[in-house]
Image (cartoon, rainbow, N blue to C red):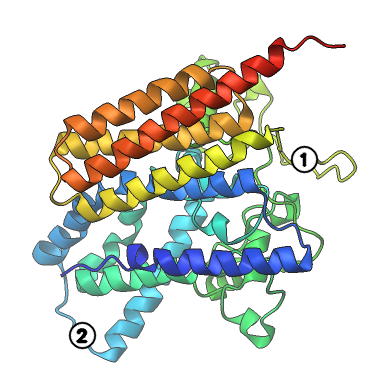
């Protein structure tokens, strides 16, 4: 029986985020911004939903190799568990390191690094496509004969461990800094300071970075994010923007070797005719500003309401998807993703967001009523969408009336 430890841990994640948020507010630390946190959580919701469509295929790949091509029949004693723990952490290090050194892999992993804040919501900011290739790095463990369920358990533990290290509240762990991946080490990993880039790729144990020369101690202040800021809260664009950059660079390259190298070389690599490799710039501390577009305060409660609806719908889908027809599952996932997009559009006050939101709400009602969802879900979510439609209409009506008042 497969147990989704990560899904079961989601309530704990939100409790810990609430505690860190309360501490940040109490100490006036400004570790959280509403728009950034919504963006981070949106990526996590999208990652869980898109992951539905690949979980079986990924597990099947490991399971097939284990059942047909394993070299050893390993027992399930404590020593094998410990050996597998080291193996999972070792291969995670190399997967993570390669995700920073190969453009095609970085195009997926970059999502996790886009936030210019550093708090526990960043831990949930995950790529929607990274899971399609990350599992390949662990296949040597299947060949060696490590049980698939043991692998899934320790792989989940490796992921869960990394949640708590996405915090600025904990400064140092003393002697444990020499062995474990800690908040201090991982803050370095998320830095866009040139000296911090491509450092500290560890999952649980920092020993791999120390062994393979990628360790960097936290020294000067860390500036979080990527060297060219995303400057968008849109979860869809966040997952494809770097692919768009790579594609445009490849189109500008007449030589086929350069077109291929665009995807295989490290981030910052460009063909000679486009200037060659471009190093990360130093942080201009005097001009540095985080992306923080203005948003009308009256829209914030509406955004919160829509986000909660999207989160509730996502949870419902995650619980129901084994029993849902394919069309209902796909349409439900699309509805949630559109909901996350509308939250980002409202926070950025995009010109197209009004028509988009009316269309999304009507589509949401049709999706819920015309698909084979349980009747209780149909009543609840169609009712919420109707209430949202009325609320949003009134918001726009008040906004239009305000614009029509002549200036004195």
Q: Residues within 10 Å of mark 1 (few under 14, many from 20)?
A: few
Residue at the location (25% across, 27% down)? 366
Vertical placement of 180 versus 324: above or below?
below
Vertical placement of 240 versus 8: above or below?
above
Vertical placement of 76 versus 407: above or below?
below
Residue at the location (57% across, 21% down)? 396
Residue at the location (32% across, 55% down)? 135
Circle 2 is placed at which residue position? 76
Of residues 215 and 318, the one nearer the viewer is: 318
Q: CA distance from mark 2 to mark 1?
A: 50 Å
Residue 335 in the image, given as x and y percentages of width and height? 34, 34
Q: Secondary structure at mark 1?
A: loop
Residue 308 in the image, given as x and y percentages of width and height? 45, 47
Q: Residues within 10 Å of mark 2 (few under 14, many from 20)?
A: few
- The circle on residue 281 is 1
Residue 102 in the image, given as x and y percentages of width and height? 50, 43
Q: Quadrant of residue 277?
A: top right
């Amino acid at each position: 029986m497969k147990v989704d430890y990560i899904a079961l841990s989601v309530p704990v994640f939100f409790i810990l985020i609430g505690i860190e948020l309360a501490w940040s507010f109490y100490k006036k630390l400004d570790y959280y911004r509403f728009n950034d946190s919504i963006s981070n959580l949106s990526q996590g919701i999208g990652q869980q939903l898109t992951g539905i469509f690949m979980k079986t295929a990924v597990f099947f790949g490991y399971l097939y190799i284990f059942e047909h091509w394993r070299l050893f029949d390993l027992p399930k004693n404590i020593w094998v568990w410990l050996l597998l723990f080291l193996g999972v952490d070792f291969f995670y290090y190399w997967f993570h390191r390669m995700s920073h050194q190969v453009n095609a892999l970085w195009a997926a992993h970059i999502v996790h690094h886009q936030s210019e804040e550093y708090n526990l919501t960043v831990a949930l900011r995950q790529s929607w496509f990274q899971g399609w290739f990350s599992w390949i790095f662990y296949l040597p463990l299947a060949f060696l004969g490590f049980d698939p369920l043991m692998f899934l358990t320790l792989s989940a533990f490796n992921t869960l461990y990394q949640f708590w290290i996405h915090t600025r509240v904990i400064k140092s762990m003393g002697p444990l800094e020499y062995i474990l991946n800690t908040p201090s080490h991982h803050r370095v990993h998320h830095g866009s300071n040139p000296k911090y880039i491509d450092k500290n790729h560890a999952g649980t144990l920092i020993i791999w970075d120390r062994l393979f020369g990628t360790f960097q101690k936290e020294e000067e202040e860390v500036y979080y994010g990527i060297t060219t800021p995303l400057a968008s809260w849109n979860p869809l664009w966040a997952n494809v923007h770097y692919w768009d950059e790579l594609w445009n660079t490849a189109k500008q390259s007449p030589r086929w070797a350069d077109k291929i190298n665009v995807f295989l070389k490290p981030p910052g690599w460009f063909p000679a005719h486009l200037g060659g490799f471009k190093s990360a710039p130093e942080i201009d501390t005097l001009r540095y500003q985080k992306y923080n577009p203005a948003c009308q305060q009256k829209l914030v409660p509406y955004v919160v309401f829509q986000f909660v609806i999207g989160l509730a719908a996502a949870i419902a889908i995650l619980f129901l998807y084994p029993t849902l027809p394919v069309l209902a599952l796909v349409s439900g996932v699309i509805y949630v993703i559109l909901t996350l997009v509308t939250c980002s559009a409202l926070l950025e006050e995009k010109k197209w967001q009004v028509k988009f939101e009316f269309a999304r709400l009507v589509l949401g009602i049709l999706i819920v009523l015309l698909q084979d969802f349980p009747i209780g879900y149909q009543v609840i979510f169609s009712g919420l969408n109707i209430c949202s439609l009325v609320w949003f209409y009134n918001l726009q009506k008040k906004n239009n009336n305000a614009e029509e008042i002549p200036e004195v």
